[in-house]
Image: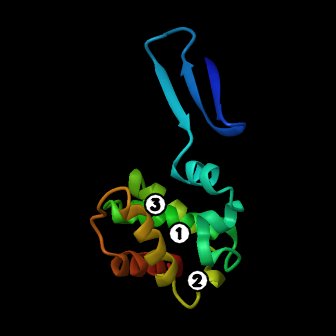
Amino acid sequence: MEGITLHFRHLGLDLGDIVLLWNAEDSTRMAVDLGTGLERLAWARTQQRWHELIYGGFAGTAPPATLDAIRTATLLLGSGITPAPRGAGGVTRRVIGTIDPEAVRLGASALVREAHGYWSLVGALRAPWPQIACAIEEEVRR
C-alpha cells in the first residue's frame, strides 16, 4: 500500500485533507478519502467549541461516543439499513451497540429528532424520527 495525503488550509485554518491510496503491486486498485465534512466547514465558519457545534444543546448530556453513535445510527436507520447479524445491518447493530444504555434509559427520541433534522438537511431520510428512535431503543435493550 502506498499513498499521499494533501492537507488544505484557508486563512490559516486547517479545513481537512484528501488521501489517495493505491496498491503498490496493482495500481488499478485505489481508494480516496476526503477528510472534511459539513461539521468541519461549520467549525471553520463559527470556530465554536467542537462538542457544542456538533451536539448543540445535548453536549455533555451523554458520553461523546453515545452521541456520535446516535447520530450515525439515525443516518443508517433513516436510510433503511436496519440491524442484522451481518452486512450493512451488522454495522448498524455494532454502532447501536456502542450506545451507553444508561445514557438513553429515558429514551433517545430527543437526540434522534435532532440528528434526523441535521441529516435531513443533506437529503430526505426514508424513515421518520419516531420510528428510528424506537428501533434504537429496542436494539439497546436487546
Q: Is residue 126 left or right of residue 44?
A: left
Amino acid type for the residue under numbered disc 3: Thr
Q: Which of the two labelled residues, at mark 2 and mark 1, occupies the earlier sequence position?
A: 1
Say which element carries label 3: helix
Using the image, determine if residue 69 lies above or below residue 15: below
Say which element carries label 2: helix
Q: Which residue is mark 1?
A: 70
What separation in Å lies between label 3 and label 2 (alpha carbons)?
17 Å
Q: Which of the two labelled residues, at mark 3 and mark 2, occupies the earlier sequence position?
A: 3
Q: Is residue 136 left or right of residue 67?
A: left
Query: Label 3: few (<14), some or many (≥20) within 10 Å?
Result: many
Numbered disc in front, either 1 or 3: 1
The residue at 35%/65% (across/down) is 78
The residue at 40%/50% (across/down) is 87
Asked whether the beta carbons under mark 2 and mark 1 sit within 8 Å of each other, the answer is yes
Q: Which residue is mark 2?
A: 104
